[in-house]
Amino acid sequence: MKFPETSLTVEHLHEPQLEFAFGQPSAHPKDGLYLYGPWSKSKKTREVRIGVVGTPDGLAHFRNWARDLKKTVKVPPPGRGEKKDRLHLADFPGLEEAFGITFEPDECRALSIPFADIDQATRIINLHEAVDRVATLFIERVRKYLRNDERPVDVWLMVLPEIVFERCRPKSQRAGLPMVPGDFGKKQREKVELPLLVHTDVIDQSEEDIFFDVPDFRRRIKAEFLSIAPTQLVRETTLAPDAFLNKANFPKRKTQDRATVAWNLATGLYYKTQDRPPWRLAAVRPGVCYIGMVYKSLPQDPDGHSCCAAQMFLNEGDGVVFRVTCH
């Protein structure tokens, strides 16, 4: 990047201190949560009501992982070629210790979907229709629960077999799979334009609403559950990588270490079930808004750079992340 200035002064800004439980400061979120717990920690541990949807195997993987989440999860020793000091990694102390929340794995609302039903739906010739059919299996399973059970759920976890990730995204390649016919042609990607017939109620095209968006399982689930409850999508291979081995007896998919996975998923559970963030900026003056901005180089313009994102924080701990583009 070229700058018009003949000289450039660089000032190094230290990481701001974050505040955690008991008013204790730390510059690193994991350190603060490990040592003190969340900023808005209450005297009594908060019970989180979780619903889980998946195949029978997926539900079993979730229960095993959830039991580990309530205990300390150590960072594994460095492997071949890794540095001894990996400062970006941290042991997970347990869900209650780090975030002040808990749940009983065996008391979660567990909703099962046969793997064969998911597999069959992913094989429908039209990708839009296939994704919609798979998403509908999960959506209708939850809606059936809501019609028949009054026990509330704070967050729904969708435990996904690998075939959902492989076959239910835009441009998914399903070559070599025995396909099954659906209601739409293989190449149809848009709703058929029949304005005269639709406006006169001669034909119902509501089923073609699946073509209004890209065929993406995640987008479909997130949109549908906006009126139900927060969701968390997780792959079975993330929860139990050692249960999916290749011919050489190694995990088929390389995942993050279990401590990092625990940190990531536990943080998601906290944000989606609690009203206050787990930390806030320390020593923030009342009535003052602090804004952090992120800049990037423009790949097509070596002489330019732009602000691509920003965060706003208040002394109450509330924060807003917004995306901007300015030169």
Image (tube, rainbow, N blue to C red):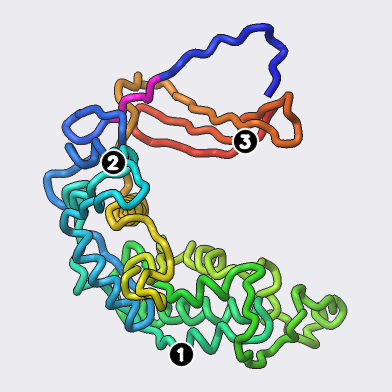
Q: Is residue 164 above or below residue 260?
A: below
The picture places residue 240, in percent across and down from the top left corner, at 32, 69
For the magenta stretch, what is the residue range?
Answer: 14-18
Report which residue position mark 2 lands on. Answer: 84
Callout 1 secondary element: helix
Q: Residues within 10 Å of mark 3 (few under 14, many from 20)?
A: few
The amino acid marked with disc number 2 is Lys
Q: Residue 324 carries which label?
A: 3
Q: Which mark is residue 116?
A: 1
Q: Nearer the viewer, residue 91 or 95?
A: 91
**Which residue appears at 30% of the width and 21% of the height?**
283
- For the C terminus, the image quarter is top right
Q: Is the magenta stretch mostly helix, strand or loop?
A: loop
The amino acid marked with disc number 3 is Val
Q: Is residue 325 left or right of residue 152?
A: right
Callout 2 secondary element: loop
